[in-house]
Image: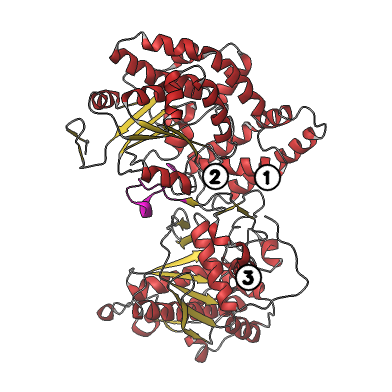
Amino acid sequence: MKYQCRRRVDKEDEMTCLIKGCNFVLKNIPHEAFVYAKHADSEFRFQTTNPDIFPYLLVNIGSGVSIVKVESEDKFERIGGSSIGGGTFWGLGALLTKTKRFDELLQLASKGQHASVDMLVKDIYGGSYGYLGLTGDLIASSFGKSATADKDFSKEDMAKSLLHMISNDIGQLACLYAKLHNLSRVYFGGFFIRGHPVTMHTITYSINFFTKGEVQALFLRHEGYLGTIGAFLKGAEEDNPNQYSWGENYAGSSGLMSVSPDMNPMQRARSGTFPFDMLEMDRLERQLVNLPLLQDPSSYIPDTVDLTEDALAREYWLYCFEEALDGVVKRAVASQPDMPEAALRAEKFRQKYRHKLQTLRQQPFAYGSLTVRSLLDTREHCLNEFNFPDPYSKIKQRENDIALKYYQKAVKSLDELSWEEKQFALVRGVLAGNVFDWGAKAVSDVLESDPEFGFEEAKRQLEERPWLVDSYDQWLERLKGPPHKCALFFVDNSGVDIILGVMPFVRELLSRGTEVVLASNSGPALNDVTNGELQILTERIAAMDPVIEAGLREDRLLLVQSGSSSPCLDLSRLDKVLAMVVRERQTDLVIIEGMGRAIHTNYYAMLSCESLKMAVIKNSWLADRLGGKLFSVVFKYEVPAGKPNKDCGAFSPS
């Protein structure tokens, strides 16, 4: 969205802008807040986005310190502060070390040994003071040794001691205010922190020490942008920016750089607001909310594997995405045959995305927790930046046209089966259709080398039962009971998948008396079917199939966009209209199809109703890791734990 520039400059209240910006990033950017753990395998532990962000304490450390209690979008109060802050560190540091640049002071501090200057508990008592619970390495007096030692102290040691003194003081002050106001969420921001590891570690240690672990010190990836974002939101109030959802554009954002002062000296030398050079946000067309059927939205984590913590998996998937680049570039160019400059734009995309992958190899925490989903989304963002919004458009059109020719024959053959044979054939159909995924290299290689590879060939590729994850018997038993009231089906690919796999399955649900909501992507991603495409396909199928036609006409079959433009699925960021439909229809079954939506994401998602997750594993490395093989099947039917399934008289497994 573009805003027209105005000639006059409006002055806004600094604190109001700061709080608006903080509320904005906490609500709109997944993995915005993190805990810093210096000695852990992964030094950043990112927090899941929670729509209920209030109340919280914001400790803003600039020249001094302001401590603000935030209770709602528009209600906040400065409850305290201190004159000892970033300006104190800079000023005293300049006097002690003759170093005038803030970044250079931080650089010195990172190399110093504060124990050379500070008096520790063990310097007084010869060890720890167990009776009072004080360890020997605890600072008893900042700069305490400088009063009696007859020697010069290094600039590095003095800078480190000063940084510890100020950080500890701020941490203790924050603890006291958090306890006084009974707040467990304390966010730290401001120019003083700037992602510096010693500062974050000292504040974290101080908070843990004084609250005995009851309060966590939380830091923000975009803390340097809070005031700027707030000022933008104030200026855009006439457009009511809070009515929209927003997302970070990974193609345009620099990402969180390494906090090591030695790894990125030029990053710090540029000064400004470390750790970012640029933040780019997209205003999404739809407002996004939680799926109402999430069992516990506050603990929901979409992604199955955190590549930030799993080094082996991280290296494999980074290699996998880099290896697939040539194919993506080829299809991007082919999608725009009438544009001679497409090849040049595609090459720029290749360079940009490869650079992103190289950055993530060095700094996997750049955009929060690194996952297969974030790698896919970053690729989509880069494609869009170079005007390739739908590289698979030609492939989708061709495969849709071919699959439609076989629809009536597929339905006729299903109707000739006995009831039990038909249920199994319907499931195998969905699974076989899901094989047709151009995002999986093992499949795209087959489809490119063998254009005749079709639905029946895909069925033969599937593993025989028992499958890798096999709840089919429980599903079949459930089908012998009364029909579900309404099924929400998150669909995956165009072509064979949606037409010959999903639609016959939907047809059967409708025939049982179950209403069906088909949720498809709002925007293109790989060869996934979009809502606009699904509308056209369903009308064409309805012209051939009276069951589908009646479902549409009687409003028992609804097509709703999910709000996503990703091959994966985040159930905490769905179209608000879809959430409303789910409530109104009293949805009691959620079906999630595909490797991206049901394995890379949502494999462990807990819902408050029955759920069915179906996917074919089309990656040999992932299959091996899960104990299966290429084209292994995941068929996971779940009933909420401890909740009786009244329809079939069974309890879910514990």
578 left or right, relative to 330? left
Gap between marks 3 and 1, in whole Å? Answer: 32 Å
- Label 2: few (<14), some (14–19) or many (≥20) C-alpha neighbours in 10 Å: some
- Label 3: few (<14), some (14–19) or many (≥20) C-alpha neighbours in 10 Å: many
Q: Could you say whether the residue bearing mark 2 is in a helix, strand or loop?
A: helix
Q: Amino acid at mark 3?
A: Ala
Q: Quadrant of residue 615?
A: top left
Give how far across and how far down residue 309 sits, in percent. 46, 48
Give how far across and how far down residue 466 sits, in percent. 31, 20
Residue where numbered disc 2 is placed: 374
Mark 3 or mark 2, earlier in chain = 3
Asked if one can make out residue 502 in the rendered structure from this viewpoint, the answer is no
Q: Residue at x 32, y 48 (%)?
A: 295
Mark 1 or mark 2, earlier in chain = 1
Residue where numbered disc 1 is placed: 355
Which mark identifies residue 231?
3
Q: Amino acid at mark 2?
A: Ser
Please provide the residue range marked out in magenta.
289-305
Q: Residue at x 52, y 57 (%)?
A: 28
Q: Main secondary structure of the magenta part?
A: loop
Q: Is residue 145 rendered magenta in the image?
A: no
Q: Quadrant of residue 39?
A: bottom left
Mark 3 or mark 1, earlier in chain = 3
Q: Does 84 appear above or below 240?
A: below
Q: Does 156 appear above or below 585?
A: below
Nearer to me, 597 or 583:
583
